[in-house]
């Protein structure tokens, strides 16, 4: 849908869950729907992207990759005394020129 409204050479910025994020590792076996695809207790679904899969998805939709990398962060819960590693994937993709037929 974004491709239809984005101007030529427009850029999409995206940040989503990355492969091996702490939330992904915590899922019990019964919550796995497919490879890297899980269902939460409330019924919502979460997909954990690899850099390769994110690039592949955008390239197939008519974008060129400007950047696409993992971002590593730590979430700290001071009250509980927890520090958990988080993995996100962040990318910038440019809408490619559509060749004339």
Image (spheres, helix red, strand yellow):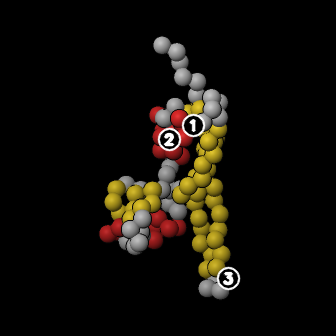
Q: Nearer the viewer, mark 3 or mark 1?
A: 1
Q: Position of residue 11 (x, y in %)?
A: 65, 38
Q: Secondary structure at mark 3?
A: loop
Dot 1 corresponds to which residue? Answer: 5
Q: In terms of sequence position, does the residue under pointer 3 or pointer 2 come before the other? A: 2
In the displayed structure, 29 sits above or below 50; it is below
Mark 3 or 2: in front is 2
Q: Is residue 30 visible?
A: yes
For this rendering, which residue is in front, 73 or 17? 17
Image point (38%, 68%), residue name:
43
Which residue has dot 2 on it? 1
Pointer 3 residue: 78
Contact between marks 1 and 2 (CB within 8 A): the answer is: yes
Alpha-carbon distance for marks 3 and 2? 40 Å
Measuring 50% from the left and 60% from the top, which residue is drawn there?
A: 20
98 to the left or right of 32: right
Can the viewer see residue 69? no
Identify the mark nearer the N-term, 3 or 1.
1
């Amino acid at each position: 849908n974004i491709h239809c409204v984005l101007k030529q050479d427009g850029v999409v910025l995206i940040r989503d869950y990355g492969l091996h994020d702490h939330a992904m590792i915590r899922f019990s076996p019964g919550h796995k729907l497919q490879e890297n695809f899980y269902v939460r207790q409330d019924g919502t679904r979460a997909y954990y992207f690899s850099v390769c899969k994110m690039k592949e998805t955008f390239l197939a939709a008519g974008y060129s990759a400007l950047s696409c990398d993992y971002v590593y962060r730590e979430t700290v819960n001071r009250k509980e005394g927890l520090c958990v590693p988080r993995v996100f994937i962040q990318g910038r993709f440019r809408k490619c020129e559509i060749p004339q037929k």
